[in-house]
Amino acid sequence: MRIKYIIPFPFGDEGVANRAVQVPQDILGPDTEVECVPVRNAGALLDSAYDALVFDMYVAEVGIRAEDEGFDAVAIDTMSDSGLWALRSRLSIPVLGPGLVSYAVGIILGKRFSIVTMWDKWTPLYEKNLDLYRVREHCASIRSVQIPPDVESLFTGKEDEMFKTLTTEAQKAIDEDGADVILLGSTTMHQAGDYMAEHLTVPVINPGPVVIKMAETFVQLGLTHSKVAFPPPSEIVDDRFFALPSAEAPV
C-alpha cells in the first residue's frame, strides 16, 4: 500500500524529515509505504483566507495525479485540510485531512473536544471547518498559547518549554471549558503529542499519525469518499495547476 502524505510547504530534506517523524511506522502494516511529498510553493503561515487559498492550490497540485502515480490514498499534513474538497472531487482513492479526521475521532472518543493551538490567527481556519463539517457544537473551546509557529524547525531546542506550555493550556480546557478530549491544533505540534498524552487525563489526538493510520485503514476496508457527495469534474484541467510557479520561480 502506498500513501502520499502532502507537506504543505516547499521544504528541503531537513524540513521534510521533521514532518516525516509523524509517520507512525510502528503501528502501520509492513507493506504500507508513506511517501512525504512537499509542495512546490505555498503561502506564508495560513493566517488569512487569502493565504489559505494559496495553500489549497498548491496542495491540490501535488495530489491531483496521486491515483495515476499508483498511490492508494492521500493524506494532507495540515489541520486546515487544504485542498481536501478539490482532491476528493478529482480522485477516487481515499483523500483524508487531519482536521476532518481529528474532529470525527474526537466525537467518537468523547462528548466535547477542545483544540489547543499555537496562536489565534489560526482560529478562523478551525471555525470555518467546524461549521463546514457541522461539528461546532462538539467543540468546547479553541485555546491558543500565543506563540507564532515555526513550521519547519517545529519545537527543536524548545521542547521542554513548549510541551509544558501546551499541556497547561490543555488542562485549562479540561478544567474550565469542559473538554473531555484534546486535539492538537496543528501537525506542526506533533512533537508534543506523547508528552501531553502522558500528563493529561483525557485522550489527546495527534492529527498527523491519526490521519495516516486512518488512510491505511480506509484502504484496507475498501472504503473511499462518496462520488455523489464529491462529484468529479466534467473536464480535467490538471495542466493549469502545473502552470503555477514554484518557490524558486519569479512571481
Image (cartoon, helix red, strand yellow):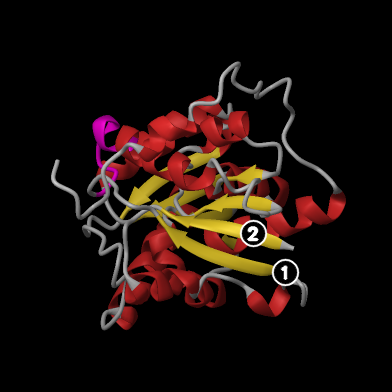
Closer-to-camera residue (39/25) = 39
Choose top left, top right, bottom left or bottom right for residue 248.
bottom left
- Judged from the image, the secondary structure of the residue bearing numbered disc 1 is loop
Q: Which amino acid type is shown beneath numbered disc 1?
A: Thr
Up-down relation of residue 36 to residue 105 (above or below): below
- Residue 250 in sight here: yes
Image check: 87 left or right of 50? right
Report if the CB atoms under discs 1 and 2 are less than 8 Å apart. yes
For the point 59% across and 44% down, the residue is 103
Outermost residue, left side: 250
- In percent of width and height, residue 1 lies at 74, 63
Q: Which residue is mark 2?
A: 3
Q: What amino acid does circle 2 point to?
A: Ile
Q: Is residue 203 visible?
A: no
Sequence-first disc among 1 and 2: 2
Q: Residue 96: which numbered mark, if any?
A: none
Circle 2 crowding by C-alpha within 10 Å: few under 14, some 14–19, many from 20: many
Q: Which residue is mark 1?
A: 32
Q: Is residue 194 magenta?
A: no
Identify the residue at the far right of this view.
221
Give the SS element for disc 2.
strand
Q: How many marks?
A: 2
Q: Determine crowd level at label 1: few under 14, some 14-19, many 20+ residues with C-alpha closer than 10 A.
A: some
In terms of depth relative to the viewer, which is nearer, 130 or 233? 233
* Residue 189: % across, % down: 40, 64
| Residue 50 belongs to the span the image colors magenta | yes
* The C terminus, quarter of image: top left
Write the start and end of the magenta stretch as one range: 45-52
